[in-house]
């Protein structure tokens, strides 16, 4: 249990952050967290409504007839990731929060699961603000404040996509989905989510006899992370590593594939993946040697990027496999497709230094009885680049002559940076006044709801701010404690001083 009074100001933030961490809120399952926030709004006497998309809108009007409409926005859902060995049911179990010290800095994290600081910090900041307005500790008499909590941001941005334009047709919007307290975000990418279902055939006539043993090989211990913000950090993709292992085994020893699995979410870099297959019992020692050598090779390749790559091996019971092995020709084609699927940065931004322009993430892989399902997520500041990645994957699948189906969604709108707006200039001035230095003005290689809002209301001036979060979308996700007070002071001063 977190003790808010020991973590700095405002205590209300930590009270609410602890409370929402006890409430299930995976994408598409926001009913309980929405009800909790709505009940708080009712307790404070603030007008609220739930729109047809499931978004919660709270209005706190000003008595000034000339007041500007300022929208404060965050999303209610979180990416639900856990380590494979952790027993946690995201549909009912509370997150187990704890504080840790890293390089003399205090951080809050969760035990074995993602923390949900993305975007739990936005929820907690908004709730703390509401409580302080109710208690008359804060007053913002120059703005009509509208607080919007959207649904399903992490798995399709459907809340933002379906929100009524009139609800966001204001003067200014502050999105609270930033990951760096020293920054103001002014731009983000567009995206496309792709699901590939490839038809497979199994061979029950393959001569698997007592000379063969079923085994499972897994890759574990990877860092994973956000498939946009962390895509340029040189981290490995567990699915790609498992496929590389399988191709090496098939070439040097021979195998009969049963299944290959990996990843937890399309928008997270896979940390774990595994495969099961048959191999001749006489080749088990050679397999163990190959895996040991491969683990050393991977550790050398990713030295400085991944510190804990593990390849594990397990012999299975001979009646363990659920299905028959894949037909050999289909096995070869599937492994080749998976080996060639792109992952990581594709292009770097031509104008903005050290910013990925276009990337793709091979997020999840699942083998079923008659098909293999692959989820990928492409991001870019140029919609044409996203289309070209998708066309390239389609061409690869077409060359395989396998039956497949692609379902895709996305291309919601790029949020192009606007560096000369009055609101950004004002925000920079407030930050410098508070902290004696300029904030970093950045665009991010991530998809924010701001792009959708900007497309709906082109005149809306938008910025994104918030506390410092690292390793989001993974069980290593952590929130920097002292960054909360910094973001809180920035936010409340912005709201108070705006004219």
Image (cartoon, helix red, strand yellow):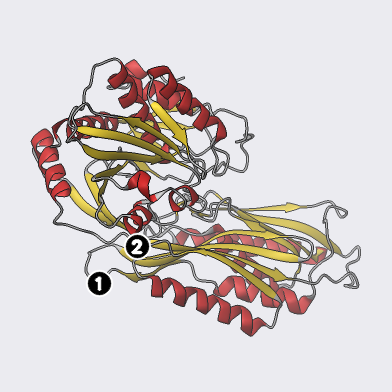
Q: Which residue is denoted by mark 1 in the rendering?
A: 350
Counting from the top left corner in percent of width and height, residue 490 is at 20, 34
Residue visible at 40% across and 74% down in the picture: 385
Q: Quadrant of residue 259?
A: bottom right
Q: Is residue 297 visible?
A: no
Label annotation for residue 370: none
Which class describes the residues within 10 Å of circle 2: few (<14), some (14-19), or many (20+)? Answer: many
Residue drawn at the location 54% of the way across and 29% of the way down:
23
Report the side of 86 relative to 57 (left or right): right
Q: Which mark is residue 414?
A: 2
Q: At 50% from the left edge and 54% from the top edge, which residue is drawn? A: 156
How many angstroms separate mark 1 from mark 2 (CA)? 16 Å
- Label 1: few (<14), some or many (≥20) within 10 Å? few
Camera-side residue of 485 and 341: 485
Q: Nearer the viewer, residue 410 or 490?
A: 410
Does residue 285 appear to the left or right of 427 in the view shown? right
Residue 403 in the image: above or below residue 149: below
Residue 487 location in percent, x, y? 25, 34
Q: Is residue 491 visible?
A: yes
Task: Estimate the x, y position of residue 319 in percent, counting from the top left.
Answer: 88, 53
Disc 1 secondary structure class: loop
Residue 333 position (above or below residue 415): below
């Amino acid at each position: 249990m977190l003790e808010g009074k020991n973590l700095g100001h405002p205590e209300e933030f930590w009270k609410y952050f602890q409370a929402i961490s006890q409430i299930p809120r995976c994408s598409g399952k926001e009913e309980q967290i929405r009800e909790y926030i709505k009940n708080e709004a009712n307790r404070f006497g603030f007008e609220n409504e739930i729109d047809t998309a499931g978004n919660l809108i709270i209005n706190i009007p000003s008595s000034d007839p000339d007041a500007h409409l300022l929208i404060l926005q965050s999303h209610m859902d979180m990416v639900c990731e856990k380590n494979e060995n952790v027993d946690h049911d995201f549909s009912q179990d509370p997150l187990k929060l704890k504080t840790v010290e890293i390089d003399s800095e205090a951080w809050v994290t969760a035990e074995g699961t993602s923390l949900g600081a993305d975007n739990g910090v936005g929820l907690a900041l908004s709730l703390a603000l509401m409580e302080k307005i109710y208690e008359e500790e804060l007053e913002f008499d120059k703005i009509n404040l509208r607080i919007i909590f959207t649904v399903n941001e992490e798995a399709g941005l459907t809340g933002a996509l379906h929100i009524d334009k009139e609800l966001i047709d204001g003067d200014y919007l502050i999105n609270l989905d930033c990951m760096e307290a020293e920054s103001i975000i002014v731009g983000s990418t567009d995206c496309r989510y792709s699901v590939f279902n490839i038809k497979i055939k199994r061979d029950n006539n393959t001569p698997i006899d007592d000379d063969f043993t079923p085994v499972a090989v897994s890759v574990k211990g990877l860092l994973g992370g956000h498939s946009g913000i962390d895509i340029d950090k040189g981290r490995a993709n567990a699915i790609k590593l498992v496929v590389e292992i399988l191709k090496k085994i098939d070439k040097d020893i021979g195998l009969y594939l049963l299944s290959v699995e990996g990843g937890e979410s399309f928008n997270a870099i896979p940390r774990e993946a595994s495969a099961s297959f048959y191999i001749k019992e006489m080749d088990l020692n050679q397999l163990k040697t190959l895996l040991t050598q491969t683990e050393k090779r991977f550790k050398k390749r990713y030295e400085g990027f991944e510190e804990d790559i593990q390849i594990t091996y397990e012999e299975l019971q001979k009646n363990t496999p659920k299905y028959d092995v894949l037909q050999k020709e289909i096995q070869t084609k599937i492994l080749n497709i998976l080996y060639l699927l792109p992952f990581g940065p594709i292009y770097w931004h031509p104008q903005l230094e050290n910013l990925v322009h276009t990337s793709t993430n091979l997020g999840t892989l699942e083998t079923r009885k008659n098909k293999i399902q692959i989820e990928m997520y492409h991001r870019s500041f140029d919609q044409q680049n996203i289309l070209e990645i998708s066309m390239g994957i389609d061409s690869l699948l077409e060359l395989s002559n396998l039956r497949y189906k692609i379902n895709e969604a996305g291309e919601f709108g790029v949020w192009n940076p606007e560096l000369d707006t009055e609101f950004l200039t004002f925000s920079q001035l407030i930050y410098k006044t508070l902290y004696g230095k300029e904030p970093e003005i950045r665009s991010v290689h991530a998809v924010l709801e701001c792009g959708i809002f900007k497309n709906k209301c082109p005149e809306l001036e938008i910025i994104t701010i918030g506390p410092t979060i690292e390793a989001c979308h993974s069980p290593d996700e952590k929130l920097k404690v002292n960054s909360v007070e910094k973001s809180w002071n920035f936010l409340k001063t912005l709201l108070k001083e705006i004219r």
